[in-house]
Image: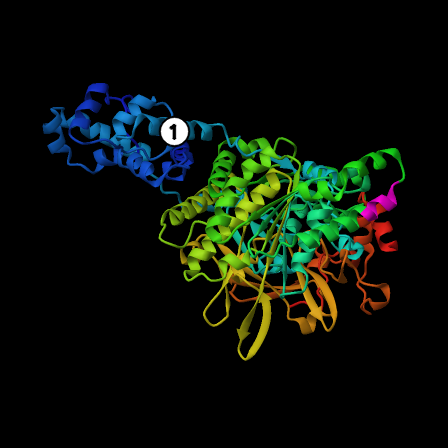
Amino acid sequence: MLGYVSWRDVLKKLTLAVTMQRPVSSLPLSPGMKLKLVGAGFQSTADLILLKPLQLSKETGLSQQEALEVLQAVRKDGGGGEGSTSLTALELLQKEEETRSIITFSSQLDAALGGGLPVGKTTEICGAPGVGKTQLCLQLAVDVQVPQCFGGVGGQVIYIDTEGSFLLQRVIDVATAAVRHCSLLVEDDEQRAAMMTFTMETILSNIFLVRCHDYVELLAELHLLPDFLSDHPRTRLLVIDSVAFPFRRFDDLSQRTRLLQGLAQQLVAMATRHQVAVVITNQMTTRLQGNQSQLVPALGEGWGHAPTIRLLLQWAGSRRLASIFKSPGNVDATVQYRITSDGFRDADQSEQPQRKRPRTQTDQSASSQPDRRLLRCLSDV
Amino acid sequence: MVVLREGMCPGLDEDLVRGLRAADIKTVEDLVSSDIEELAQKCSVSYKALFAIRRVLLAQHTAFPVSGADLYEELLSSTAIVSTGNPSLDKLLDSGLYTGEITELSGGPGSGKSQVCFGVAVHISYQLKQSVIYIDTTGGLTASRLLEMLQAETTNTEEQMEALQRIHIFRLFDVFSLLDCLHGLCSGGLQQASVGGGSVKAVIVDSVSAVISTLLGGKQNEGMSLMIQVAGVLKTMAKDFNVAALVTNHVTRGGSGEVQPGLGVSWSHIPRTRVLLERVEKAVAVSRPGLRSATLIKSSRQPCHIKEEFDLQWWSRSKGGPSLGKRKLDETDS
């Protein structure tokens, strides 16, 4: 009896060892190559690991170059997932605390977002036409360049314009206002030195504008961006204004969903790997449900999962409101803002909405941010 | 399935392998399914030798029947039920996540999928003192939110740090790195992760649909194959290493506006238990803004379509202060 049991255990281990092998079809290879491998009887990576490229190409009919590629893919897998490094939540927390957020020049919105627009995450701004999506984007393109000694991130910006709504005159207005604001805050020599390089001209030279006319251009640009980001390591912000426009007149909906999902994953990967804040704008559309109609962000339900943070800009009578609709780290909140000739700003205190949400937690997180000094000054302006 | 090689079993030498190749017998599968007598003549080997080889190969590659009693004993010794830390969800899931199984959470944007994942991760690492693997494919993981949840549990900073160290994070954004990572975990990664104290009890993938749905649709059918690969390795891992797998999925809207989990019919067979999360209608939600409803849509233990409501603000039992909650839904939300 004992002998039988141990025999069975041995066999079980054997079958386990077999099932533990990685199937060839899960390797990152082209379908044609996989087909040839499987056709020649190579089902799992264990069959391949001991082979030489020449041998493999003879047995499968792959070219030597392809055979080499296959073996490289197999050997890389043998390393036990070294290509993707794991980190503990504690390390991630430290990283998060080291990176600063991009301030929006609206202290209330900054507070609601826990210090500003987070670097390393994707944020979507949706709203009806004329509510201020592009204005907020232009404001952010300037804000990201605020020098570090003023509590900014001192970075560069890539601005992908698909609608042709990038107005240089507005950027100059906003930039001039930001320079003026910072020059009023100068206290020490470091800041004085920083102001020498923080001028309207340098702000403009640090904005890289890409005009994309259709979705093919947009997708192509996104494929090239990782190289650009490696060449310009100071880039901290990527704006796409808007993602909806090139994708709205699309006949094949399942194709559109697939392209958009791919685009979303590319953006998330870029945001994480290059420590860039990604801001995308989206239009609104009407959804009919029974006989009720509702204004919802465009591009469908599936796209809603793509951005990490979703910001909704909307009109309420003559007031403009910004709501955080989805965010893994913040409480849902609504704040009022206004668009002035200087850019995106807080609404006057007297016009504040009556109902206030409890702010204990967001206040705490705001106070832990390094740019608090700037925030306080902003609300005094 | 496996290519024939010399030395695989006694009697299978180089000459024989070459001979079999010539007769178009390359894999074990070919050999087992061929007519031995004919083959013996073709390769001029003895029928007896081939028959013996076939028997050994069959024994090596077969699956063995296990008696129900043995299985039950194994079940009792190895299966654990991991509490999610939320009483309503535990009730829905028949007391928690089962190790060896895949549990799925689906829901629209902002329905609280990630928050539930955070809650489960924090509960396992802090209350149960076990390790958790968290695979983030959407960039939604925010460590400061994890810390916030821990602060609701304890004020001891050291305990908070320890709990955070038991959560291991992988941030991957395409299906091949996900497969690499899962295979890596199967071949040793899980043991490595448990070195730091506490074995790995749960693997969370948030979200599985983000990497897979980029491959589905259109005329490509490779996406389907990769989806099943992911499902297969998740299942193997859950079963062989006794971990609970928790995955999230997005939702799609059917023709008449009803909400259903994404990834289609093939995927619907993969998770053993499926839960649909939704925001609770606004009329109720004004007073309790973090309110979410969870509906059981597939389960092998409980009747389906049970609905439970819970509040994301009060994740850990019912003591966390209202200020520590996540959501404040607004009337202006739409």
Q: Position of residue A281 (x, y in %)?
A: 61, 56
The answer to whether residue B287 of the structure is visible from this angle is no
Q: Position of residue B144 (x, y in %)?
A: 72, 45
* Marked residue chain, label 1: A
Q: Is residue A21 left or right of residue B140?
A: left
Residue in view at x 29 percent, y 30 percent: A62
Residue with the mark numbered 1: A69
Q: Quadrant of the C terminus of chain B?
A: bottom right
Furthest toward the bottom, the residue is A291
Residue nearest the viewer, comparing B272 with B47: B272
Residue type beneath disc 1: Glu
Give x and y (percent) for residue A321: 73, 65
Residue B155: quadrant of the picture? top right
Left/right of residue B309 with respect to residue A112 in the rendered view: left
Residue A183 falls inside the magenta stretch: yes
When the figure is inspected, residue B188 is found, relative to residue A208, above or below; the finding is above
Residue range (magenta)? A180-186
Q: Quadrant of residue A69?
A: top left
Residue A267 magenta: no
Q: Position of residue B75 (x, y in %)?
A: 50, 45
* Position above or below: B125 against A380: above
